[in-house]
Image (spheres, rainbow, N blue to C red):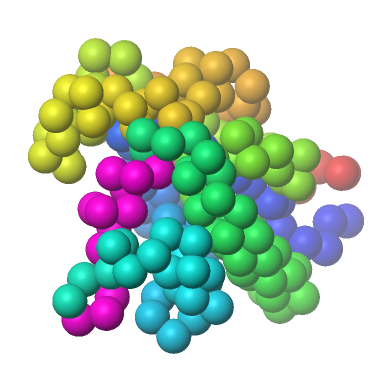
Amino acid sequence: MNTRPLHVALTGGIATGKSYCLARFADLGAPTIDADVLARQAVAPGTAGFDAVVAEFGKSVLRRDGSLDRDALARIVFTDVAARRALEAIVHPIVYAAIGRWFESLDQSGDSVTAAIADIPLLYETGHAADFDCIVATTCRPDQQLERLMGRGGLSETEAQDRLQSQMPAAAKAAKATYVIDTSGSLMETNLQVLDVWESLRTRAAQPR
């Protein structure tokens, strides 16, 4: 009998619907955690991550109130590979340590949790896919992905393309995943796929591992 929940990673390209799907999994009863939220916490003022970012990039990435200017930092890291890697070297270890503690707390809780899901956008890029029992990837049509990214962030097409090119293509992530949720269609179609994947995860969780 399995004594811990299935460790699941939710990943996918930027603007392919990960956050929406994560919320739907939570609605279905899955414990969830979001690496993007953890990344913001990792560089909050007063943290070691914040101090490391300022030491690496200087005060030009700070607002007048002393908080991190994420837009200024994004303009640097999405056009400079070395800068992006430097930021990732600061943030990713903190994020993965937090995710590990979260899974450990669920493993030891004794609660009847079948599967727990961590939303990790850069799962494959950071080489952590093997840390999980299975992986769910979101995807959509490339033209939709670009349109969504430009629409939600007020980005120019060039800026949006820079962000897309900083990650593994969504289709490549989907090809590696255990499950794929295609968000190209309606919300109802996406919801049904989430439900199907959740039922499959619950079945998988009951099997010997």
x%, y% of residue 41?
Answer: 44, 71
Dominant secondary structure, magenta: helix
In the rendered image, which quarter contains the N terminus?
A: bottom right
84 on left or right of 146: right
In the rendered image, which quarter contains the C terminus?
A: top right
Taking the spot 21% from the left edge, 71% from the top edge, the residue there is 63
- What segment is highlighted magenta in the picture? 65-77
Quadrant housing residue 94: bottom right
Front residue of 49 and 81: 81
Front residue of 115 and 122: 122
5 on left or right of 87: right
Q: Is residue 61 visible?
A: yes
Quadrant housing residue 112: bottom right
41 on left or right of 122: left
- Relative to residue 120, is residue 57 depicted above or below? below
Magenta stretch containing residue 188, yes or no?
no
202 on left or right of 37: right
Taking the spot 48% from the left edge, 45% from the top edge, the residue there is 83
User: How many numbered dots are placed on residues in this image?
Assistant: 0
x%, y% of residue 23?
Answer: 36, 52
x%, y% of residue 34?
Answer: 46, 57
Magenta stretch containing residue 75, yes or no?
yes
Taking the spot 55% from the left edge, 78% from the top edge, the residue there is 48
- Relative to residue 25, is residue 147 depicted above or below? above
| Residue projecting furthest to the bottom | 46
- Relative to residue 39, is residue 66 depicted above or below? below
Q: Is residue 113 visible?
A: no
x%, y% of residue 6?
Answer: 70, 51
Taking the spot 69% from the left edge, 51% from the top edge, the residue there is 7
Quadrant housing residue 124: top right
